[in-house]
Structure formats: structure tokens, C-alpha cells
Amino acid sequence: GLEVCKEILTNHDIPIIISSARSDITDKVTALQLGADDYLPKPYDPRELEIRIKTILRRYNTSTKVEEKPKKIFIFDEEKKEIRKNDKFIRLTAAEYEVLSLLIKREGFVVSRDDIFENSNLLNSDYDNIGSLAVIINRIRHKIENNPKTPEFLHTIRGMGYKFLQ
């Protein structure tokens, strides 16, 4: 049983309760040191086993929920002025960086075209019209989307602007 416990814990992250006819303290200590979550010597009342299982699962499910933060696909580092997708640097022009960084900062919210011009350096550059912005958005999609024609990250919200989701 102890060898099985070691093997399971090597490859899986699941709770283990050892049920054994051996009730020696050395066996209990060894099993718990190997990583078993509980040790229940036989004979025992099935209700006790049921309660121990529920207790361990409650703790296990709570701890896994805390750890299960979805990993962000896009990382925006304002100090370095870089954006990464799945930890790979995305080569962007200054205009593309300005637009994408603003959309990432406002992730989940619709950002109007006017907002993009007002809150980026595009207003003071050659890109000062809506057509130019559409070209920039298109270039960004080609760099960040798996299929730019059906975007999953950078969405156009008709009549309103753009929304970035990850």
C-alpha cells in the first residue's frame, strides 16, 4: 500500500486515505510522511470513513480553488514597454503598442475610437483618422490572434469601439 501511495503521489495530485489492517504507529507515521492525507486502521465504522472523506475533499477542493487562477495569456509590462503572449515577445510598432496596451489596461471594457485617440499618442502622429486606426487594429490582430478573421482576444463592438478579452 505504501508503494502504491508513493507511485500515485509521484504522478497525481489527489487526496489519499489509507485503510489498513495494520494499526502500528510506525505504519501510520510512515504513510503520512509519504504524503497520505489520512490513515484509518481496520476495523472502523463506515460513517467515520465517510466523514473523513468529506473532510479531506472539502479541504482539497478549497485549496485547489485558491490555486486555480487562470493564467493570463497576455502580459503587459509598462516599464519595459513590452507585451508578451504566452511568454513570447510580440513585435509591435509604436502605434500598435499604444493601442494594444490601452486595450489591455481596459480589458473587458469597450474602448471607443475617440478614447483610443485621446489616451494614446496616436492623436499627435500620422495616425489621426478612423481608417488609420482600423489598419492598426488589423495589424495587431495578425500578430496576436490565431485566426485574425475570427478574433478571440480583440473584438470590434459595432458602433462603439473595441474590446480586449483574454
Image (tube, helix red, strand yellow):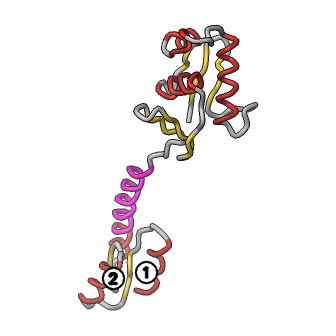
Tell me what residue is drawn at x 36 percent, y 55 percent.
Answer: 63
Tell me what residue is drawn at x 56 percent, y 45 percent.
Answer: 88
As displayed, is residue 36 above or below residue 147? below
Horizontal side of residue 14 vs 98, given as left or right:
left
Estimate the x, y position of residue 84 in percent, counting from the top left. Answer: 53, 40
Estimate the x, y position of residue 126 in percent, counting from the top left. Answer: 62, 11
- Look at the image and tell me whether residue 1 can be seen: no
Q: Amino acid at mark 2?
A: Ala
Count neighbours of disc 2 (C-alpha within 10 A) and say few if under 14, some if 14 to 19, many if 20 or more.
many
Specify the farthest residue to the left: 25
Which residue position holds label 2? 31
Which residue position holds label 1? 5
Numbered disc 2: secondary structure:
helix
Circles 1, 2 touching at the beta carbon (< 8 Å) = yes
Tell me what residue is drawn at x 57 percent, y 13 percent.
Answer: 112
Estimate the x, y position of residue 81 in percent, counting from the top left. Answer: 47, 32
The region drawn magenta spans: 52-68
Tell me what residue is drawn at x 30 percent, y 85 percent.
Answer: 30
As displayed, is residue 65 above or below residue 76? below
Horizontal side of residue 17 vs 88, given as left or right:
left
Estimate the x, y position of residue 107 in percent, counting from the top left. Answer: 50, 28
Q: Amino acid at mark 1?
A: Cys
Q: How many marks?
A: 2
Count neighbours of disc 1 (C-alpha within 10 A) and say few if under 14, some if 14 to 19, many if 20 or more.
some
